[in-house]
Amino acid sequence: MEQRTLLALMVFSLLIVIAETIDQKTDIEIYSLHVDCKVTSRFAHTVITSRIVNRANESREATFEVEIPKTAFITNFSMSMDGEVYPGIIKEKAAAQKEYDRAASQGQSAGLVKITDRKLEQFHVSVSVAAASKVTFELTYEELLKRQLGKYELLIKVQPKQLVKHFQIDVHIFEPQGIHFLETDSTFMTNELTEALTKVQNETKAHILFKPTLDQQKKNSELDETLLNGDFVVRYDVKREATAGDIQIVNGYFVHYFAPQEMPVLPKNVIFVIDRSGSMTGRKIEQTRDALLKILQDLRPEDHFGFITFNNKVVEWKSSLLPATEENVASAAALVQTLIARGGTDINGALLAAVGVLDKAEQLPERSVSMIILLTDGQPTSGERSVEIIQENVQKAINGKYALFCLGFGFDVSYKFLEKMALSNGGIARRIYENADAALQLQGFYQEVATPVLMQIEMQYPENSVEGLTKNNFKLFFKGSEITVSGKISNKLDLLPVEIKAQSHTSNLTLKEEANVKEKEQVFQNQRYIFGNFIERLWAYLTIQQLLEEAISAQEEDQKALDAQALDLSLRYSFVTPLTSMVVTKPQQQEELANKPTEADNEKPSSLPAGGSRRVKGGSPAARRRSEIQTRGHRKMLSAVSRSRDANRAQAIADEHPQFLLQLPTQNERICLNIPTRGQTSVPLLSDPEQGLTVTGKLGDGRNHFVQFDITYVNPPVQIQVYTHTILLSHDKKNSQLSWTKSASSTIQGLTVSVEKERSVTASLPDTVTVKISLVRFPDDFLGLYFLNSDRFSDKVTGVLGQFYSKAQFGSHSNNDQTAVERLLRVYGSEQDVSRLYKKDYRLESDSEPVSCWSIDLTP
């Protein structure tokens, strides 16, 4: 989900990765690493300080890498070297980019922050350190912790990659309401490390200290390898009374937390709208079936439910909602087990059908919550295809009556489309990551929304005495979560009254509370609270998040006004948000940008497959800079001297990429394919007469990768020639050109050709296989080819690649599990042994970890 969405996630995550940048561990030494996390009334302020020394007799590159929560805002970063401090300056994004563009022309690089996980994003910066010199990195960020299923969680994922002489994690917690429970957990804890952990707790405060010695960090006494590799978790919740919540006040700003206890659960009427199009084939549909079977068992007897499945056709399981009796649940489970993926994707028809079922539902509980949960892994390819029209149709049909939750499975979905549709209809969007735990992700999301206890909640404060009030009206409140409202007290009040109105399962509620301003202020003065103006910063953080979320579904003019307000606050409080950037100045006046990525940017995640290993980044400063170019694609060329010097190294890196990666549509298998040939004018890669599609390719001169692909369509008669330097379109004896240097699109009789700047070009035609070509930037660039919706290929598809989509089958022998290293592959009657290898996936970010695939060399 895009960062603009204020998720109902209640997770505070921190992953520390200090990467070694040279082959010899003793050269760059992290001699001190301190994580200081102060949590005051749910608002977390974290400072990470890393001190590094270069023990080599020449300059080395030191790298600082930390992973922080997606919902956190970086507020400060600095580097200290040789008595000089190099601070990061937060500026408006366009102004920062303009400043960077001037520096980029001098060969500098950008992209300090990128999304690396479903909850995390990585901050990365490196600097050249002279022999025997030291550098100190310091990063600060802030985040409001969210309550999820009855607890707050601080996840500190520790990976220093080497023994650290002074390693320390401090977590200070101050909760004026009182700490209800507090626990710690770890995946790497041993008896020796347990001795390094201490916990001190009283009614309102807690301090967790983890400070292992060098010996305690070692895997064994003979090897200098660290045990610190895994999760360090702190979980807690606060005490609550049966009142209108807790109000806290500091320096004229207040925060109001509301999480009522012991409330009866509202019955819910839920329709599951499940995508069963061809792109869901294999693991996705299997995981969806597994999740739905468990979710069905969690339905309450008073709930009503229904199923709609869709591809290019929309199928209603029943014409009306059914009560969640044992018989009906068993009948639905039988349906789920028969789900098969094939065909297109009619999202519009499926959602309108779901609204129709809710509209005509009868005999539902008078006080109940109606919701639609959509799960899809692709974009609309059947029925109505315009996302804007679909959004308009759905919002008009729902008309505020129901909540719509949109789950996007994988990275072929248009996340912005799903997010806007959900936020416009009282729900949220969430991306489901294509990992082994995808079924658990689906179940986890359902658990968050499975137990509504209040609806139509209004938090009312005196209008003349409170200004800058954050969101105070909420459609639903779910058990185990928490409502947070903040604002500024504009007049000198003795008492701050609050009135809460809501609908419960049994009645209309009115709750009242009065906060004595002086007494509330005194609480924090007496306790010497952890950091001073935290409620004002909490208010700014929450306001920015909500403005950005509101802007997603607003009209264009309103969106500009909302963005302007969020930008003003971001600059005033020094937050790196989607509207600001941090300009990081390094020695020799080099500059880099730290931008806040969004979930919509997260289209190509990197993951470490089972059995894979994370490469240690290394080499000289010059080599490190070249690596940054290769992984980020921000520098477009190297000097002739650099090309000559690094030719061998560049080819070695390029060889990590197979020429082709094929995902077989009927099997959950990936093939890495190479064509060991040179000098052919054209390689016949694929031809499908029923699709009216032909693809050919051309290898680079004396190289083992493709530098040109030609895509030819019969209807409409269009040819697309994709080169590493440009894209040419030919239709009706007319030619046009698209550039890699900017994002753009062109549509010819329903065929859409879209360019994502410096990354990929996509050709899509309704009900036809989508062709996608990636641009991979090395000192010598090349192209990668792959197909989406490959289940649409007919059984007549031929060609070097086509034969695998129609005829490839793996032999069934004892080693056909996911850990096997050798298998038998049959294609058109011929058999060949294939080996499992780990290769770079050009479909992902080029600095991603290798992926597992069955490797084959083929002569066309």
Image (spheres, helix red, strand yellow):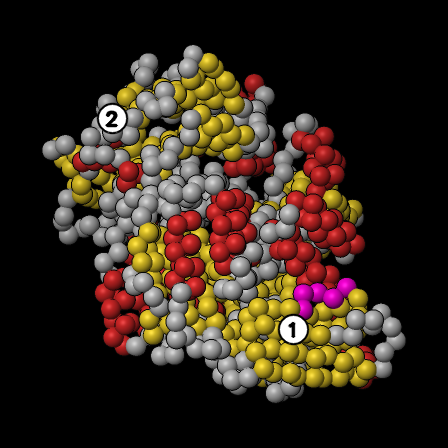
Q: Is residue 780 above or below residue 61?
A: above
Q: Is residue 858 above or below residue 391?
A: above
The location of residue 168, given as percent across then percent down, is 61, 66
Which range is magenta? Answer: 468-472
Q: Is residue 729 above or below residue 69?
A: above
Q: Nearer the viewer, mark 1 or mark 2?
A: 1
Q: Which residue is mark 1?
A: 458
Q: Secondary structure at mark 1?
A: strand
For the point 32% across and 17% down, the residue is 682
For the point 75% across and 84% down, the residue is 514
The location of residue 35, given as percent across then percent down, is 63, 63
- Compared across the picture, whether 600 is left or right of 464 comes to left
User: Looking at this view, is 150 or 170 the one in front?
Assistant: 150
Which comes before the other along the chain, label 1 or label 2? 1
How many numbered callouts?
Answer: 2
User: Looking at this view, is 137 or 505 the one in front?
Assistant: 505
